[in-house]
Image: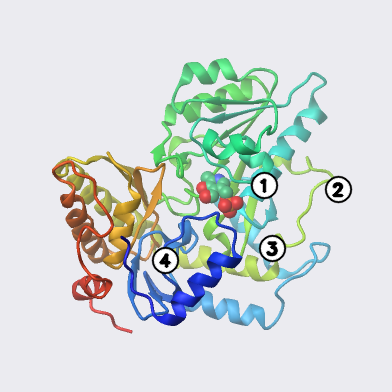
Amino acid sequence: MFDLRQDADALSILSRDSETLLPVYARYPVVMDHGTGVYLYDSSGNRYLDLMAGLGVNALGHAHPRMVAAMADQASKLVHLSPLYASRYPGELAERLCALSGLKGVFYSTGGSEAVEGALKLARTHARQNFTHPKHGIVALRNSYHGRTYGSLSVTGQDKYRLDFGPGLPHVTFVDRDNLEQLRTAVTDATAAILIEPILGEGGVHIIDDAFLVEARRLADQHHALLIFDEIQCGLGRSGDWFAYTRSGVQPDALILGKPLGGGIPLSALVVNEKLFNAFGMAKHGSTLGGSPLACRLGLEYLQIVEEEGLLAQVTDTGDYLLQQLRQLALASPIAVEARGRGLLLGLEITQPARPIAEAALEQGLMLNVVQGNVLRFLPSFLLERKHVDIAIELISRILNMGGDGSTISSSGLGSSKQAAVSKVDSLEPATV
Ligand SMILES: Cc1ncc(COP(=O)(O)O)c(C=O)c1O
């Protein structure tokens, strides 16, 4: 089936993992060793063009020299400090995030789910402090993804993740994206918060209409609910703007950020407006590891690099080019339905399971990611260039053409050994390291 030749050491690592790590992830049978820029190398010496960037975390690619230098310098000085003490970088990063978003203050956590928990707690406590009637409701979107902890899972609009662990938090209502009528019915005076990913990422890559965001803002104001945007995946430059919501002109009360923020060191941020600045209250919320000096220093370095290297413009340029190529591919292939997304958060929906396509691509030295079973999601590093897009498109179109007659693609369908496959990427852009 899936033949990715790995050396004996790699095979023993894979075998040990299968004995010791809970089988929760549908992992690919390769052992990665190191990366540079948009490329990753496995421990058997094969090179891969990485179009998933650690699920969006590695927005500056692998081993960016400035991130490596900042990490080494900070690691030699101060990695972790109890949140009960101050150091230079958390406040400096908060100031920067507030300046970019127009919001007022930041609470740091580690992963995205933890920051979503914070947002839910904030919404509930804000409602309790300001209103005497029951006001616990959270309105979220069907097909959304907000994380795996109990609160974040409870507001994730996908039964397949939630139902095995139920019951979750009560008072959660889901509405279809862009459905104004459902939104108007769902939001009432009992609503504490409306929670929206401005671009649904894990849900299959769907941009939420500006009109829906505008109406969510209006309803939140009318019913004294908070409007919270989860930009853990689509924020911090991935859409080509600092934040995906910016173009709508809508301002949220709270914004949740994560993924690339700490450059791979866990860091997430709940950024809130003036009225929420004191809402948690002293010692009512916390995170031992959130907002470490190391993570915050890397957060600042990340923002500076994106700015100084003009990466927002590059995300827009490369993203537009990739989207255009994917659209052409969708027109040409009977098994491709639609290409969509913005910046470097793109999806290609196909008519059959996409996993075999990702496996066939990996055999060819191309790392893709699958969501919703039949959507190839593209979440590459912002360093991706048009020449890398050309390589990826050529490989993907070859794979899709195998299913051009409607037959199902299998990972071994190209009949190529891994060596031949990876040399395909190498032949298109020779390795320099
Ligand atoms: C929009 C969104 N929210 C929340 C999360 C959860 O973040 P984490 O996996 O870091 O807990 C994710 C992760 O993919 C996400 O895409």
Q: Amino acid at mark 2?
A: Met
Q: Quadrant of the N terminus?
A: bottom left
Q: What is the quadrant of residue 3 in the picture?
A: bottom left
The answer to whether one can see residue 253 in this image is no
Determine the residue positioned at 66% across, 27% down. Answer: 225
Name the spot of residue 174 as percent of width and height, x first: 56, 26
Q: What is the quadrant of residue 108 in the picture?
A: bottom right
Name the spot of residue 251 as percent of width and height, x first: 55, 37
Specify the label residue 104 is tagged with. 1
Determine the residue positioned at 24% across, 53% down. Answer: 321
Q: Nearer the viewer, mark 4 or mark 3?
A: 4
- The mark nearer the N terminus, 2 or 1, is 1
Give the mark count: 4
Q: Nearer the viewer, mark 1 or mark 4?
A: 4
Q: Nearer the viewer, mark 2 or mark 1?
A: 2
Ligand 1 closer than 8 Å to label 1 CB: no
Most foreground residue, 86 or 427: 427
Q: Amino acid at mark 3?
A: Pro
Residue named by callout 4: 29
Residue named by callout 2: 282
Residue named by callout 3: 90
Tell me the distance, in whole angstroms, between the alpha carbons under discs 1 and 4.
45 Å
Helix, strand or loop for disc 4: loop
Tell me the distance, in whole angstroms, between the alpha carbons under discs 2 and 4.
47 Å
Q: Nearer the viewer, mark 1 or mark 3?
A: 3
Up-down relation of residue 19 to residue 221 (above or below): below
Determine the residue positioned at 83% across, 21% down. Answer: 132
Horizontally, is 399 left or right of 158 in the view? Answer: left
Tell me the distance, in whole angstroms, between the alpha carbons under discs 3 and 2.
18 Å
